[in-house]
Image (cartoon, helix red, strand yellow):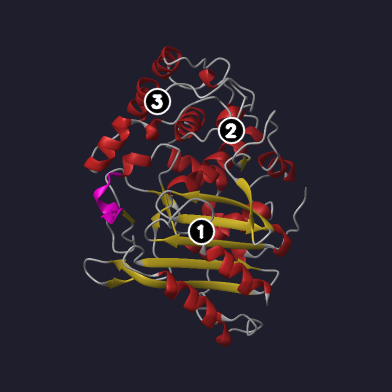
Amino acid sequence: MSFRKVNFCTKLSGLIFCLMFTNCSNQKELDSFKLETVMEDLVNKDNPGVLLNISSPAKGILYNGSKGYSDVKNGVKLKPNQIFRIASVTKTFVAATILRLWEDGEIRLDDPVGKYISQEHRRILKEGGYDPSQIKIYHLLTHSSGMAEHTTSHKFSLEFMKTHHVWTRTEQINDLIKYAKPVGEIGEKFSYSDSGYVLLGEIIEKVTGESMGDAIQTQLQLSKLGLKDTRMEEFNGDNSPRRIHQYNSNVDSYDFHPSLDYYGGGGLLSTTSDLSCFFLALFENKVFSKQSTLETMLRTVNYNSKQKMDYRMGIWKTEINGVEAYTHSGFWGTQVVYIPSIETAIAVNYSQHWPGKGNAPILEDVLKIIMKK
């Protein structure tokens, strides 16, 4: 598999984004009015705001827009360059960091996780029916370890509703084995597990000697790629005016301690423009030293039966309007996609997660507009 290099994102990192394409050269054909209307239609009492970025070097498109409110309580309008919790989209960055370490020979994907995690965590996993000497890094990356999900436990739901509960990585691993059982044999099937990525975060820290957030910055060279606003949230929270208020059942994300989703399954703050920038860089082969590493990341995982999601390593394959795309989404309402056929990245953030499962509904409308250009 190969993707043409277009050297787009880093060149544009310092430009002011065009909100209306009628004012931008070579972009008159895009119906920006329709994009504005699509976003406007999404804003309601259950979704107070939406952020949208489209970055398409092949089509000459660079769009960064917003509608609605950043802070409903105080009536503060949402701006295009505001930051937000990207939740599980962090997994794409975590997986890419692991693969960079693999490229450099620091780890092997078939290394047992027990080689890198703490003695305490090895003990906890064994007590819960997991064998850290048999579960490989590869299994964690692809959610094929047989590991359950600590966030589905009754205890997590109770603590989640308390909002200000402060979590540790060890507590989350403890809850994995205390409140859930293994979902299958190693390599048997796909089963999404934040807990697996919590362990990957620990592996990153063990190998690099840095915090996970610092290691992501260093290994992926985010600044060099043009990402200026992607970083780990401060442990006690980022309450700066640039961070938007996101909602779950209309409860403000500011009331949820960052440690709820912090250790690898989530943890990063970003913007829609940074997320599009990263996905473009990833598929332009600017993140890894070798194109074969991207191919490894995107390689199909083979099982004996059809799985509910075509998950690769920190990213999955989907379709939007019948068009192939690679994507990841996050709990608070974030999704970023890359569409190889038109070399286009789209990032969107709903202030409150869209109803139902699957892709963010706005993506279908946005892709229709893009394809007409």
**Which is nearer the N-term, disc 2 or disc 1?**
2
Residue at (49% x, 62% y) in the render: 348
Which amino acid, by three-letter code, is at mark 2?
Phe
Magenta segment: 249-257
Q: Which residue is mark 2?
A: 190
Q: Residues within 10 Å of mark 2 (few under 14, many from 20)?
A: many
State the separation of the CA atoms marked 2 and 1: 22 Å
**Which is nearer the N-term, disc 3 or disc 2?**
3
The answer to whether residue 108 is left or right of residue 269 is right
Across and down, in percent, residue 58 comes to 70, 69
Q: Nearer the viewer, residue 51 or 364?
A: 364
Residue at (66% x, 41% y) in the render: 297
Across and down, in percent, residue 259 comes to 32, 39
- Circle 2 SS class: loop
Which amino acid, by three-letter code, is at mark 1?
Ala
Q: Residue 54 appears in which quarter of the rendering?
A: bottom right
Proximity of marks 2 and 1: CB atoms separated by less than 8 Å: no
The answer to whether residue 59 is left or right of residue 87 is right
Q: Is residue 368 magenta?
A: no
Q: The C terminus appears in which quarter of the rendering?
A: bottom right
Q: Which mark is residue 360?
A: 1
User: Relative to 152, does residue 44 appear above or below in the rendering?
Assistant: below
Which amino acid, by three-letter code, is at mark 3?
Leu
User: Relative to 213, does residue 85 appear above or below in the rendering?
Assistant: below
Q: Nearer the viewer, residue 30 or 362?
A: 362
Residue at far right of view: 1
Residue at (57% x, 63% y) in the render: 346
State the separation of the CA atoms marked 1 and 3: 29 Å
Q: Which mark is residue 176?
A: 3
